[in-house]
Amino acid sequence: MLKDRLKTLRNEKNLTQRELARLLNLSPSTIAMYETGQRFPDPETLKKIADFFNVSIDYLLGRTDIRSPVDEITEAVSDDPELFEFWNTLKEREDLKLLFKQTKKLSPKDIKQIIRIIKAIEDEEDKGE
């Protein structure tokens, strides 16, 4: 599964194997072997690949089809227009990136509740300004 996901992600960014290898500080033959399934990256390299493509390691390994925690939250709030709109402004904030990584342990209902709490805090802070 990694071989297919890696090749798809690389192609989506219009990168050659050589370009990706340079960006990840790997050899082009290493990337080629990953994409053919002849070799598997060590944990540190796997993390580097996931970070580069902004996807989870679980996505790279085919354990989920949700590319990143941000996508999981988006899916959880998609049926609530107010939360969805709020989430679209929230997801760009660097100070909340850690929260996004924790969502894999939460149900969609729990994710919605957390977003509602954050929205209530933000709304309260906006009133105080």
Image: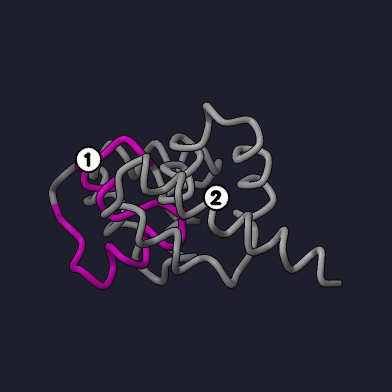
Please, what is the three-letter code of the amino acid marked with disc 1? Gly
Q: Looking at numbered disc 2 in the image, what kind of residue is underneath it?
A: Arg
The residue stretch that appears in magenta: 39-66
- Residue 91 pos. (x, y %): 60, 54
Q: Along the horizontal axis of the image, is 31 left or right of 88?
A: left
SS category of the residue bearing label 2: helix
Q: Who's the residue at 28% across and 68% down the image?
A: 45
Q: Nearer the viewer, residue 92 or 59?
A: 92
Which quadrant of the figure has residue 109?
top left
Task: Name the residue rendered at 39%, 61% in the picture.
Answer: 101
In this figure, which residue is indicated by the disc labeled 1? 62
Q: Quadrant of the C terminus?
A: bottom right
Percent coordinates x, y for residue 1 in the rendering: 20, 38
Dot 1 alpha-carbon crowd within 10 angstroms: few under 14, some 14 to 19, many 20 or more: some
Secondary structure category for the residue under label 1: loop
Residue 76 in the image: state x and y as whole percent: 44, 37
Question: What is the residue that sits farthest to the top in this orientation?
Answer: 79
Contact? badges 2 and 1 (CB < 8 Å): no
What is the C-alpha distance between the residues marked 2 and 1?
31 Å
Q: Is residue 60 magenta?
A: yes
Please name whichever residue, 74 or 106, is drawn nearer the observer in this view of the structure. 106
Residue lying at the far right in this picture: please name it: 129
Q: Earlier in the sequence, mark 2 or mark 1?
A: 1
Of residues 120 and 56, which is closer to you in this image?
A: 120
Is 10 situated above or below 39?
A: above
Horizontal side of residue 92 vs 127, given as left or right:
left
Q: Residue at x 65, y 45 (%)?
A: 88
Q: In this view, does 21 lie above or below 79?
A: below
- In the picture of the structure, the residue carrying the numbered disc 2 is 116
